[in-house]
Image: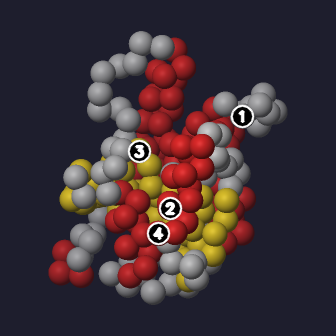
Amino acid sequence: MTGFIGTELILGGARSGKSSLAETLATESELKVVYIATATAGDDEMAARIARHRTQRPQHWLLVEEPRDLAAVIREYSKPGYCLLIDCLTLWLTNCLFDPEADQYPWQQRKQEFLQALNEAQGRIILVSNEVGQGVVPMGEVSRLFVDESGWLHQAIAKQAERVVFVTAGIPQVLKGPGLLPSEG
């Protein structure tokens, strides 16, 4: 769908197909794609995941690796004719919550700057995130904090976004905004 310009949030569980959908939408946009990766390779398994994702993306996409300051990246690269694909917000949240410098740059400040940057953005922005709030309430304090903050982040983005899509078993369901096919718009 080449005509869609705006912000869209793609949610889903692990291995739901959300990243594949986001990459397909970015490719079909016919815009210059900037892939913004938030993952950091903290162990061998995560390094392998990152390497696998790199090989699956088109080589002509510009890659920006930014684990924390998404607002600055959005402000730098968001412009007409561009599609920013940010994958993944829950990794970004984790990076921010457990940042050694979180006392100097707290999560709530980062979140507000990110939402403001989204609000001011030009071009198309595709945000990918894990929906983690559909299970039982976690027992640990840190886990509850993460689930709560991701849920509040998703709500804030969904309020601003022109389209919100939930992906289950590779099947996208549009929750808000225009359909994914031109006939659904």
Quadrant, the C terminus: bottom left
Mark toward the start of the polypeptide (2 vs 3): 2
CA distance for labels 3 and 1: 20 Å
Residue holding disc 4: 56
Q: Secondary structure at mark 2?
A: helix
Find residue 22 and report its image quarter. bottom left
Q: Nearer the viewer, mark 1 or mark 2?
A: 2
Q: Quadrant of residue 45?
A: top right
Find out whether the residues at labels 2 and 4 contact each other: C-beta distance under 8 Å.
yes
Check disc 1 and give the amino acid type: Asp
Other-residue count near label 3 (Cα within 10 Å), few / some / many at <14 / 14–19 / ≥20: many
Query: Residue 159, which numbered label?
Result: none
Amino acid type at image mark 2 = His
- Tell whether label 2 touches label 1 (CB within 8 Å): no
Disc 1: CA contacts within 10 A as few (<14), some (14-19) or many (>=20): some
Relative vertical location of residue 138 with respect to residue 115 in this rendering, above or below: above
Cα distance in 3D space between marks 3 and 4: 19 Å
Closest to the camera, between mark 2 and mark 3, is: 2
Cα–Cα gap, marks 1 and 2: 24 Å
Q: Does residue 138 sit above or below 103 in this rendering?
A: above
Q: CA distance from mark 2 to mark 3?
A: 16 Å
**Residue 11 is at least partly visible in this image:** yes
Mark with earlier residue (1, 2): 2
Label located before the other in sequence (3 or 1): 1
Q: Which residue is mark 3?
A: 130
Which residue position is annotated with label 1?
99
Where 159 falls versus 109 (above or below)? below
In the rendered view, does 184 fall on the left or right side of 130? left
Q: Nearer the viewer, residue 38 or 81?
A: 38
- Could you say where residue 3 lies in the image, as x and y percent from the top left? 37, 84
Dot label at residue 53: 2
